[in-house]
Amino acid sequence: MDLANLVPVPVLLPLLAAGVTLGLARRPGAQRVVSASTLALNAALALVLCLAADRMGPIVLWVGNWPDGTGIVLVADRLSALMVLVSSIVTALVVIFPSRRDIADSAEGAPVSVFHPTFLVLTAGVANAFLAGDLFNLFVGFEILLFASYVLIMLGATKERVRAGSTYVVVSVVSSTLFLLAISIVYGATGTVSFAQLPERLAALDPGLQLTIQLLLLVVFGIKAAVFPLQAWLPDSYPTAPASVTAVFAGLLTKVGVFAIIRLQTILFPESPLTDLLLVAAILTMLLGILGALAQGEIKRLLSFTLVSHIGYMLLGVALGTEAGLAGAIFYIVHHILVQTALFIVVGLIERVGGSTSLSRLGGLAAVPLLAALYLVPALNLGGIPPFSGFIGKVALIDGALETGSPLALLAVIAGVATSLLTLIAVIRVWQRAFWQDRAESEERKLSLRVLPRIWVVAASALVGITVSLTVLAGPLTDYASRAAHDIRDGAYHVAVEEAQP
């Protein structure tokens, strides 16, 4: 079988399963089985694509086989195949968690039966964005996942969710409008939106117009990735959603924005004049994000601010403009997707066991040793404690910055080290207050994992176990990331798309 025919499957399979789960609206157990099975199959297919792309180079499918390259093109290179694989693993584990209590938050009449169909549509949008071979299909991927996220973030229709969701929707609509405007300008100026054709045609434009297009797209993707100063919407939007929704949003959605920035900076504008601007943005994103985290007294908000700060590490790797920096960014994206998702899932378990995520109301959770371990392992990983993958990823990025040697790169190294130490302080503060301090007398209750479904504990343990496995697999993953970075920079993407064109 032609492997190119597998490329659209990670998009089509969840969409088909969404229709099936919608027909099972009155059978939530069956919905969960269909969703988890579909996403597990997606992960297996993504692994096949990942291995094939690593062995054979980018796998390209021109949908519809239209002549002259006028159709939609999907491309599974090393980077996009890896992103689809990691996102499929995460969504397959997280989809197990939603329950009526988690989604509806005691709201009567909440349409919880739409969770699984909407969640599957969101995963299809994420996969489409990763596999997109042109700007317009990337826009379509963003819109699919955003429309699904609008539903997910407001499920339960509580006052807090509606208020936070409204902010999220407004920001998303503004960024999508700007994205469509940018696509219109690009197509009007070059006559194409294909990633393979745009570099040559953009280079022929007036430098002022090139800079305008690049800045406009950076603003669009910066909003979606929550890069400073475009990040203010995130800490107010994510914490109010159900735990399973927040976990996927935190783990995946911002990384789609970072992925788009990588495509922009390495394929469309490989000789970018904006590297210094990106380095400044990376430094400020790291520092201001983590300072915001230290000021929080609620775990979900604290983790939302750490999410913002660690986007800065990924942006640093892209901004360096070197193969080593890009490889470090790719490694760190994989690490952060898994670790951040695991932490938000564990916080959901903490909320069910302890009755709150407010640090002023928690305490004594160390009496539940497995829950304590499930929090501590990814927390230390996020803080960059050796030998975890967080330490390995940060060292790779710091090495790339030191290799560059510019004053801004050296300042970014200092900011990265400071952010790592402050992250460790933030997560240990949660550990000390939620797990070690005595519970307030008024809040005394029996703490036990028995209040959780067994499948939740198993799935959370599996997710945390995968984050630990990144340490064992750090060598192969680092090598893969280096090959992915080399592919992007040596033009393999363009050659593969042009050769596959009908």
Image (tube, rainbow, N blue to C red):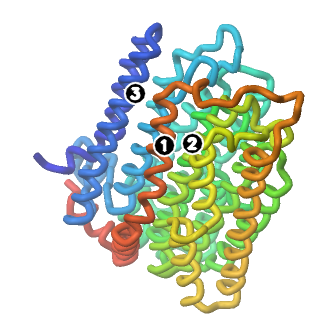
Vertical arrangement, residue 236 with respect to residue 121, above or below: below
**Foreground residue among 458 and 186:** 458
Residue at horizontal 49%, vertical 73%? Answer: 328
Measuring from the top left, give residue 468's x and y in whole percent. 47, 57
The residue labelled by disc 1 is 461
Vertical arrangement, residue 307 with respect to residue 244, above or below: below
- Quadrant where the C terminus is found in the figure: bottom left
Q: Earlier in the sequence, mark 1 or mark 3?
A: 3
Q: Is residue 57 visible?
A: yes
Look at label 3 and name its amino acid: Ser
Q: Nearer the viewer, mark 1 or mark 2?
A: 2
Residue at horizontal 59%, vertical 31%? Answer: 449
Look at label 2 and name its amino acid: Leu
Q: Earlier in the sequence, mark 1 or mark 2?
A: 2
- Separation of residues labelled 1 and 3 (CA atoms): 20 Å
Q: Are marks 1 and 2 in contact (CB under 8 Å)?
A: yes
Measuring from the top left, give residue 308's x and y in whole percent. 69, 57
Look at label 1 and name its amino acid: Ser
How many residues crowd mark 3 within 10 Å: few (<14), some (14–19), many (20+)? many
The residue labelled by disc 2 is 370
Q: Earlier in the sequence, mark 3 or mark 2?
A: 3
